[in-house]
Image (cartoon, helix red, strand yellow):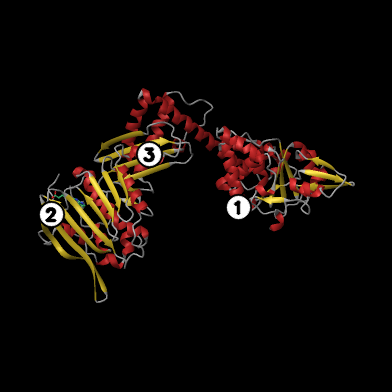
Amino acid sequence: MASYDAKDLVVLEGLDAVRMRPGMYIGTTGIKGLHHLLWEIIDNAVDEVANGYGNKVEVTLHKDGTASVLDNGRGIPVGIHPKLKVSGVELVFTQLHAGGKFGDDNYKYSGGLHGVGASVTNALSRYLDVTVHKDGKKYSARFESIEKGGKVHSGVTVQHLTEVGKTTQKGTYVRFLPDDRVFKDTKFDYNTVLERLKETAFLNKGIHIELIDERTSKHETLCYEGGIRDYVTHLTSEKKPLFVPPIYIENEIDDTYVSLALQYVDTYTENIFSYVNNIPTPEGGTHEVGFKTALTKVLNDFAKKHNLIKEKDVPFIGDDFREGLVAVLSIKMKNVQFEGQTKTKLGNVEARSRVETVCAQGLTEFFESKKNENVGSLIIEKAKGAARVRQAAKKAKELTRAKNSIEGSMLIGQLANCTSRNSDINELFIVEGKSAGGSAKQGRDRYFQAVLPLRGKPLNSEKKRIDQVLANEEIRTIIGALGTGIGEDFKLENLKYNKVIILSDADPDGMHIRCILLTFFFRYMRPLITNGNVYIGMPPLYGVKSKGKIIYCYTDEELADITKDLSKYTIQRYKGLGEMDYDQLRDTTLDPAKRTIIRVGLEDAVQADKEISLWMGDEIGARKDYINKYANFNRVDNFETKTEDEE
Ligand code: 0RA
């Protein structure tokens, strides 16, 4: 390591500008900007420790509103700069962009490069104290922002670096008070700091970080011997991992250090957390591209080598290998260039091939090992699922696109459409069962009411993936009939019916169908629900015949109410829609003047979605509860929705 002293520090400009335009340096003067002050100080301490010059960083949030950061590194240089005639410590805190990491060899890689430096923290503080323990001596310096003639002079040295005693320790201690003339809110948030420190601890394996909140006596010690492996385990702790432990590789190539940890979980999203010199790169960049290329290549090779691809399988694309992926990619290199909207995207072209090489080598080695073959097969199986879904989604898209004249389509065969083409008044009844469907077709007003009978359950509850949902003919018929498309392609303006009314029986099966349909709308046509186009039809539970007339009752209470004043009557209990004649169905359920329908709100859809999840889960108890609950389902009080006349 090169020798270092104050003369090596490069000086760029003064602090004046910082207070004038804090936003230029820390983004905002809101709560985020406030914490930025602390990150600058923490990053410096972590750099020192992560480069092997110490092992501990302690962050304290004090009662007096100050924050302090202590490390046991080498101590900030104390020598006097030959030209500028001030100590290294003073340069670090009073000169913008002055720092040991600026174009010298003190650190192999440095996170702080991205940062604006500790001087910005000083510029935006009421005061800042530094104590350095070095070579048996203890030094201190103090800076203040002083108001003079209506102007605040930022970060002025009020005590030059002075030897104040002897010590047996080594390291740096920085304590500062954020300036309330700059920040509306000057209170550090424990959890924000904790989350940041956790991330830092994961990215720098083995270093000890302690957070102490003296205001609340909260306290946390962080140290992850597994580094980003532990990070991935942490990120997936609430989910179901495909294997354990996460895959981990690390290597160095051409002065670039690359480490990668990855896992798959049973969700369908891709989560790659990438970092360069400990700085998050949420916009990705060349390092992420290198990793993705390597992953695709290695997994394709693995599948071929082990004959895991069959004739009937959909060929893989890169996306298929990233469904459910949780990965942390951390690289360290020199001369980083950031690009993108928020300057959080790595631009260095050389990073791409370096990361690709390290990842491809490491992953190949991993999968070539006999004991990891099983992990490889599991990933390929998962990718096959992703490929199938992709294919099915594409087909569904084509289907809904090609579908403007649905009448001519085979799929739409069961639909009895209305004659009106006015989507503002048209209604679509989705009816459970062929016989009820038949009654509905006869009893409807053909001008504006369309009927689509469902053969039974529109799909088996076990089949929850989009490809299986979309493979179902009834669902595809519904999609075709509504005309809106699904998912990202959904267009409310193409909706052909103002009301989509689900008519199912008041029994568990009917309930199940209703839940499945609501879940489908919730997941793939959500605006239909938020816009209030989906309704539940309410057929009566009983028909009370008395003196040649029939009175319909929708609840047990109603039945009791009606019958208590009657002397001679017979009760007919409708077990299903199919038991009603077409004219009964018209009078009770179809005719807008007489029927009751319930508009479905988002809450109901969320509930249905949950319930479907219960069905698909393997918890017997949950299923039993569900059935018991819905034995008595078809009652208004089970819905928190408006009835039509409240509209
Ligand atoms: C450059 C060189 C040396 C130490 C540091 C920077 C340093 C900076 C910070 C910031 C917070 N804590 C720090 N600890 C060390 C080494 C100089 C020498 O060996 O004399």
Q: Are marks 3 and 2 in contact (CB under 8 Å)?
A: no
How many numbered marks have been drawn onto this rendered protein structure?
3
Q: Position of residue 182 (x, y in %)?
A: 32, 66
The first of marks 1 and 2 along the sequence is: 2
Ligand 1 within 8 Å of the CB at mark 2: no
Mark 1 highlights which residue?
A: 530
Q: CA distance from mark 1 to mark 2?
A: 66 Å
Instruction: Please state which amino acid type lies under the numbered disc 1.
Output: Thr
Q: Which residue is mark 3?
A: 232
Instruction: Look at the numbered disc 3 and give the secondary structure of its residue.
Output: helix
Query: Residue 377's quadrant in the figure?
Result: top left
Whole-percent x, y for residue 256 in the image: 26, 41
Front tag of 1 and 2: 2
Of the residues under marks 1 and 3, which one precedes in the sequence? 3
Report, in whole angstroms, how far the alpha carbon at label 3 lies from the one at label 2.
41 Å
Estimate the x, y position of residue 231 in percent, counting from the top left. 35, 40
Q: Earlier in the sequence, mark 3 or mark 2?
A: 2
Amino acid type, label 2: Lys
User: Is 172 left, or right, of 430 in this rendering?
Assistant: left
Q: Nearer the viewer, residue 138 or 446?
A: 138
Q: Position of residue 501 (x, y in %)?
A: 70, 47
- Residue 592 located left or right of residue 617: right
Please tell me whether residue 260 is drawn above or below residue 76 in the rendered image: above
Q: Secondary structure at mark 1?
A: helix
In the picture of the structure, the residue carrying the numbered disc 2 is 138
Q: Please tell me how crowded label 2 is: few (under 14), some (14-19), or many (20+) other residues with Cα within 10 Å.
A: many
